Image: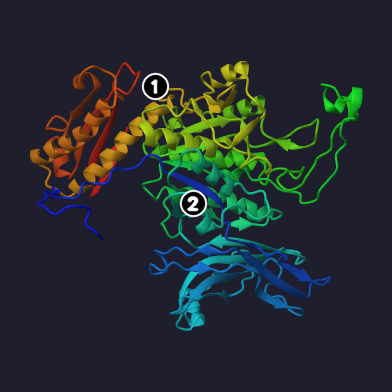
Amino acid sequence: MASPYAVPGVYYEPRPRAQPRPVPRTDVVGFIGFEPRVRDGATPTQLFGSPPTGHAFRVDIISFLLPPELAGGARLTAPAVTDLLLSESVVSIPIVPGGSIKYALVAAWDASRNVQWLVVAGPPSAFPNSPAATDEDIAAAAGGLKWLRIADIHVRRSSDGASVFPAVLPALPPARCNDWNDFALRFGGLPAVDDGTLLARAVRAFFANGGARCYIGAIRRPRFDDSAGLESALGDLVGIAGSSERDATGLERLLCIFEVAIVDAPDLYSRIVDPAARTAPVPRPASDACFRVCSAIAGPRTAVSAAGNYAAGGPVFADAGVLATQQAMLVRCAPERWRVLLLLTAPVALDPLTGVFSGPTAARAVAWRQQLDGVVDDLSASVAAFYHPWALTQDKVGTPVYELPPTALAAGIIARRDLARGPHIAPANESLVGVVGLSPTVDEATDAAIYAPPLNINPLRPFPGLGIQLWGARTLSGDLWMRYLPVRRCLSAIERKALAALRPLVFEPNTPLLWFQITQAVLAILVPVFDAGALRGDTPEQSYYVVCDATNNPPESIAAGQVLCEVGVAIAAPAEFIVFRVGRREGVVEVLE
């Protein structure tokens, strides 16, 4: 590296004695969606004959960058393949009716870094959940090549034996993307043909609106006509609480990443795309084509489906499944309310006049929001925020317009405000990039009705000269102060920073010296927050307090190896302190509100 000094001389460059500790970020989003890199083949997985006597199992793979951290630091590109054959025979079927089999999809490479695909079959089972191929089986098949398991293809046969249903089970951990190009390299970018999934478009909208980092947690990708597979996908989206990082899926896996502060599940709202183009009557010309409703002139319009349009196939998941999943996510995130924010919305609905699925109306959003009441206690409800309506997005003039849930756009605005001014600033009153309309629009009266407590629905609104803006910053909580999103996020940011700052002190002797160190570490967090204007009060005494001494650390707590620090902060408008406690127990640092 060339010297930065242009002329000779004597220069002094101060160097710190120790590297500064990294500050935990609060703008990082975790997205949950169907595995986009591998899917059922262009020639679908199927059985032959009636009754079936043969089979052909295939998958399609897009070109993507293998995770360098898992590929020995090498930047290897997995080649795209159409109709990669897993197994084929015209005279036999490897699984019995009601049984299943799993194929390990493996990327292997040699010293020249040439990547090839290997398929390693696991043992077939007479039950729906068959075992996968072991690492020893894969190593034997690789024959000395370096390898990485990409996914397991789970092929399940129906109980009547007439059909098979493949599902892609991702084997790679969540991937970190720092911009849209990162996502395009790791996940292929936007799908070549619209398949109804929303993950890629949500990530693109997030980065376009100010996002700077996200993690992508891929879950199983079943065929959309597989009801049992879709039910399993909903379970994978939430995951099982307490699972290890290796076994955790969806939300549970993202919660293992401390950096993730916001969670969105765009593919929970995926839609079935009808690839067949249809015709629709248009208004007659001349005098009849005036400013009147088209259906009054030409009759009700029919559903139209072409590239970028959704037909009457409707959403992938039924309303009951979406609601149950959102409620389960709320319950799971409630204990983590100090470190994560869950973004929610209502799914699309069928328009009875046109027979076409479109964004939820205000009445549907209100009814949906009310069904989330009582799932968790009022304080824990501050873990989530609800947005309405859906947005009409367009990359550039002349390209198709797509309906997109508002959550990804809100995530971008939250990250934009956080990075520019801090988490204590309300993520609202910001124009949305790439949004050309709303489905449906929100007027002044609707805004007043849905934003008022106890609904606290954050609307997207059009404003002449400003475009479409995010016009709300409230959580689901009915608490007087925790209903405000900047209060919730500012408190969460303080707690996250306190946890990170106190981790180096976990195994220090529990003495007054430790109490002093804890107090100084917490004050080092609160003073900049006070200076930024995030706390109420003209003096530090009016804005915060820290207690970590013999008054809240009696001898019995010291004997148990516990240390407690009580922190009170007056964030923004509150007239009283919000209190949380941070302490050490059993070798870990815990936060309790």
Between disc 1 and disc 2, the foreground one is 2
Residue 240 in sight here: no
Q: Is residue 25 left or right of residue 555?
A: right
Distance (Cα) linking label 1 and label 2: 32 Å
The numbered disc on residue 216 is: 2
Q: Amino acid at mark 2?
A: Ile
Element carrying mark 2: strand
Q: Earlier in the sequence, mark 1 or mark 2?
A: 2
Residues packed near mark 1 inside 10 Å, few (<14), some (14 to 19) or many (20 plus): many
Image check: 200 left or right of 563? right
Disc number placed over residue 351 in the picture, else none: none
Task: Pinpoint residue 66: horizontal percent, then vertical percent.
Answer: 48, 65
Q: Amino acid at mark 1?
A: Trp
Residue in the image at 25% along x and 26% along y:
530
- Mark 1: secondary structure: loop
Quadrant of the drawing holding the N terminus: bottom left
User: Camera-side residue: 506 or 394?
Assistant: 394
- Residue holding disc 1: 481
Please determine whether, in this image, residue 2 is positioned above or below residue 260: below
Give x and y (percent) for residue 535: 29, 23
Q: Quadrant of the C terminus?
A: top left
Residue 383, image x and y in percent? 44, 34
Q: Quadrant of residue 522?
A: top left
Closer to us: 47 or 124:
47
Tell whether label 2 touches label 1 (CB within 8 Å): no
